Image: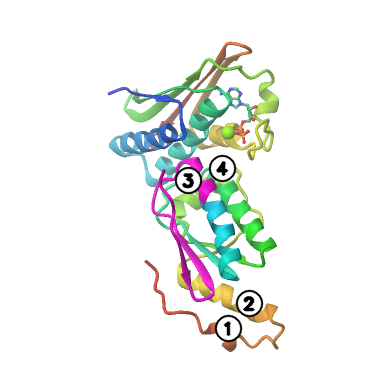
Amino acid sequence: MDRVPVLKIGDILLVSIQIDMEDQVALQLQEDLADRIVATGCHGVIIDISALDIVDSFVGRTLATIAAVSRVLDAETVVVGMRPAVAITLVELGLQLPGIRTALNVELGMDLLARERGDDDGDDGDDVEGTDTPAVSTP
Amino acid sequence: MNERIEVTSDRDVVRVRQLVRTLAVAVKLSLVDQTKLVTAASELARNTLVYGGGGSVEVSPAENGRRKGIRIVFADNGPGIADLDLAFTDGYTTGGGLGLGLSGARRLVDEFDIVTAVGEGTTITVTKWCR
Ligand SMILES: Nc1ncnc2c1ncn2[C@@H]1O[C@H](COP(=O)(O)OP(=O)(O)O)[C@@H](O)[C@H]1O
Ligand SMILES: [Mg+2]
């Protein structure tokens, strides 16, 4: 069975889904991510789905579960890179992805996480502190 | 060029998605329509596997005058669906899913036909036409 790699970049776990996942592979990713969040203490997860040409209700539910589990483990999840045709189809399918934050690409996802984390730390809303994102460019 | 896939595992659902994509590209469905059809096929093939206990998926080009399209038939000999209205209700699931497969798939295609009998099985035929 294929396995989707989870990369640690600074305080963030980055997952770039590059394959058409069998359902079991998606469930394995869900478990792997929970383990890695606990093992690393990372506070942010970015899931890049720019290579996915569809998101059906199973993958959608997996993404929603990952986001919910991450939150319980004190990590925020951002799904990035959804293709326009996938977004249109998701809406018509009726999938709302509750509780999932989205951004257009990895870089904007990192900005979003940094901002949120900055606010969470209770600083005075000064975003500058949170913008020291690691140098990673969109694939 | 009818193509048939026996669906008995997760892997076969992936094969269905890939086959439908290939044929949808061949008849020149638009990108959005390809995406809708492949998504619908993924939902219905998973239902064939999970609820129908496995079955078959047959994909073929369709023609209606000058219009071209793709027709897909999902067939299983599983338990059938007793209450279709309920099964097509958004959010209704007996398997812990999101309950969007049947209702969502119907929205994503141009034609949707279902024949089901309790204890005998379910056959769903969908068609997507080029615009
Ligand atoms: N091929 C099938 N055979 C028997 N029952 C089915 C079949 N397809 C769907 N169903 C029933 O219809 C319900 C709704 O299906 P669906 O909308 O795909 O939602 P989900 O897959 O999330 O349960 C299923 O939970 C199941 O009870
Ligand atoms: Mg389903």
Q: Is residue B16 above or below residue B78?
A: below
Mark 1 or 4, closer to the camera: 1
Q: Is residue B101 magenta?
A: no
Q: Are marks 3 and 4 in contact (CB under 8 Å)?
A: no
Q: Amino acid at mark 4?
A: Ser
Measured in 3D between alpha carbons, the distance from the residue under mark 2 to the one under mark 1, in whole angstroms, is 7 Å
The earlier-in-sequence mark between 2 and 1 is 2
Q: Are marks 4 and 2 in contact (CB under 8 Å)?
A: no
Dot 4: within a 10 Å radius of its alpha carbon, few (fewer than 14), some, or many (20 or more) residues?
many
Measured in 3D between alpha carbons, the distance from the residue under mark 3 to the one under mark 1, in whole angstroms, is 33 Å
Q: Chain of mark 2?
A: A
Residue B4 % position (x, y): 36, 23
According to the image, label 3 marks what residue?
A: A25
Dot 2: within a 10 Å radius of its alpha carbon, few (fewer than 14), some, or many (20 or more) residues?
some
How many labels sit on residues?
4
The earlier-in-sequence mark between 1 and 4 is 4
According to the image, label 2 marks what residue?
A: A117
Measured in 3D between alpha carbons, the distance from the residue under mark 2 to the one under mark 3, in whole angstroms, is 30 Å
Evaluate whether label 2 is on the same chain as label 3. Answer: yes
Q: Chain of mark 3?
A: A
Mark 2 or 3, closer to the camera: 3
* Ligand 1 within 8 angstroms of badge 4 C-beta: yes
B69 vs A120, nearest the viewer = A120
Measured in 3D between alpha carbons, the distance from the residue under mark 4 to the one under mark 2, in whole angstroms, is 30 Å
Q: Chain of mark 1?
A: A
Evaluate whether label 1 is on the same chain as label 4. Answer: yes
Q: Magenta region: which residues?
A: A1-28
Dot 3: within a 10 Å radius of its alpha carbon, few (fewer than 14), some, or many (20 or more) residues?
some
Q: Is residue A20 magenta?
A: yes
Evaluate whether label 3 is on the same chain as label 1. Answer: yes
